[in-house]
Image (cartoon, rainbow, N blue to C red):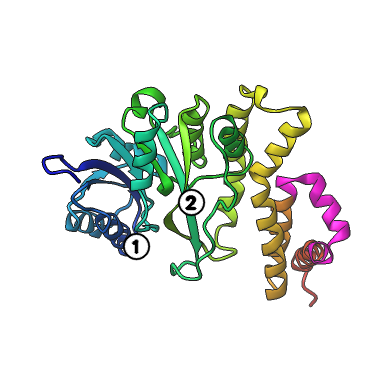
């Protein structure tokens, strides 16, 4: 960095709720990226009720602000206070990787027509171990190709996103009516006007959840992801070569949830939790009814999970014999 040139200031919005231990790791990873060329303004939007959260925020020189429930409101609370020329994001249970941020800024410098850049994540287990390969493995493209990717199953995690602060005036804040999917909705607003780019840079360690721990969340996410898809895909009909291509994009957009339920149905069956096994089959049928009906015929574990739950329910309803 040339003498006399001030470091760039990037505001980082961090939504959090009652996870001070993982929050500390997240904020530590942000500060670790600072240097003579780069400084961070940490803005923590808290919708929890643990006093430790404010203490951790102040420990890393962050700005603490109260927020209503949800990641969207938590991010919005931080974004409203941002004073940097750029805005980045990090969830309270993820961590920045050392190579994050600077490649995004370089791409924004080289392409003034872009207002945001997304990158790759590395999935881990709940302990930030057992790292996956960087995802997406395939380049999602630029321009219309990137918009098609976003509508067809590519979900850039917010921790991989860096945007010019000016996008707030152009595209607004996160839609707080969306309990889930508000991140993709916000990214699509930028991408649809041709202002989003992609860098093949591993940006964050994304902390996964143990299988079977978010069944109810997955059911709710299906509803909101469908809404976000239709909100942005229908006005962009020009992107699809045919109705079949449109339907394939819709399928790719939510099929993760189908395979999630199909997988955990087998896990519950193996553990003897027949009621949850049947509920998981119901979740898969909710996502893709026709595919689920076919798999009830062609996949034995799927069929057995449903039948085991039904028989158990009938046994529970049967009157006890004296």
Circle 2 sits on which residue? 120
Q: In the figure, is residue 38 to the left or right of 207?
A: left
Query: Which element is circle 1 on?
Result: helix
Instruction: Indicate whether 266 appears above or below 11.
Output: below
Name the chief secondary structure element in magenta. Answer: helix
Q: Position of residue 140 (x, y in %)?
A: 58, 42
- Mark found first going from the N terminus, 2 or 1: 1
Residue 25 visible: yes
Crowdedness near tag 2: few (<14), some (14–19) or many (≥20) residues, C-alpha within 10 Å: many
Q: Give left or right: position of 22 versus 294.
A: left
Residue 168 position within the rendered picture, expressed as x and y whole percent measured from the top left: 35, 28
Q: CA distance from mark 2 to mark 1?
A: 21 Å
Q: What residue do we see at 72% from left, 46% from top? A: 286
Residue annotated with mark 1 = 22
For the image shown, how many numbered marks are present on the structure?
Answer: 2
Q: Is residue 309 left or right of residue 194?
A: right
Please provide the residue range marked out in magenta. 285-304
Residue 292 lies left or right of residue 30; in this view the side is right
Farthest left residue?
A: 4
* Residue 74 picture location, percent across and down: 35, 43
Residue placed at 48% from the left, 28% from the top? Answer: 189
- Label 2 sits on a secondary structure element that is strand
Image quadrant holding the C terminus, namely bottom right
Q: Is residue 45 magenta?
A: no
């Amino acid at each position: 960095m040339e003498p006399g040139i001030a470091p760039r200031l990037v505001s980082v919005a961090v939504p959090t709720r009652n996870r001070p231990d993982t929050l500390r790791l997240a904020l530590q990873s942000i500060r670790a990226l600072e240097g003579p060329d780069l400084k961070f303004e940490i803005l923590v939007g808290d919708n929890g009720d643990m006093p430790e959260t404010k203490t951790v925020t102040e420990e890393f020189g962050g700005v603490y602000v109260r927020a209503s429930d949800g990641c969207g409101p938590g991010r919005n609370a931080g974004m409203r206070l941002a004073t940097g020329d750029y805005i980045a994001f990090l969830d309270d249970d993820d961590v920045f990787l050392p190579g994050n941020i600077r490649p995004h800024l370089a791409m924004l410098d080289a392409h003034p027509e872009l207002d945001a850049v997304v990158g790759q994540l590395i999935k881990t287990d709940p302990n930030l171990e057992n790292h996956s390969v960087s995802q997406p493995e395939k380049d999602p493209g630029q321009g219309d190709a990137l918009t098609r990717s976003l509508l067809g199953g590519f979900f850039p995690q917010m921790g991989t996103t860096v945007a010019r602060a000016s996008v707030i005036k152009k595209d607004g804040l996160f839609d707080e009516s969306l309990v889930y999917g508000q991140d993709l909705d916000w990214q699509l607003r930028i991408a649809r006007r041709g202002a989003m780019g992609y860098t093949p840079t591993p940006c964050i360690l994304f902390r996964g959840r143990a299988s079977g721990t978010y069944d109810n969340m997955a059911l709710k996410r299906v509803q909101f992801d469908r809404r976000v898809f239709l909100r942005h895909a229908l006005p962009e009909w020009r992107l699809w070569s045919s109705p079949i291509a449109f339907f394939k994009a819709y399928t790719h957009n939510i099929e993760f949830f189908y395979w999630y339920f199909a997988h955990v149905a087998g896990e519950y069956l193996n553990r003897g939790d027949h009621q949850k096994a049947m509920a998981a089959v119901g979740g898969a049928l909710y996502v893709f009814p026709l595919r689920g009906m076919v798999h009830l015929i062609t996949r034995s574990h799927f069929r057995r999970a449903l039948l085991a739950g039904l028989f158990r329910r009938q046994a529970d309803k049967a009157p006890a014999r004296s």
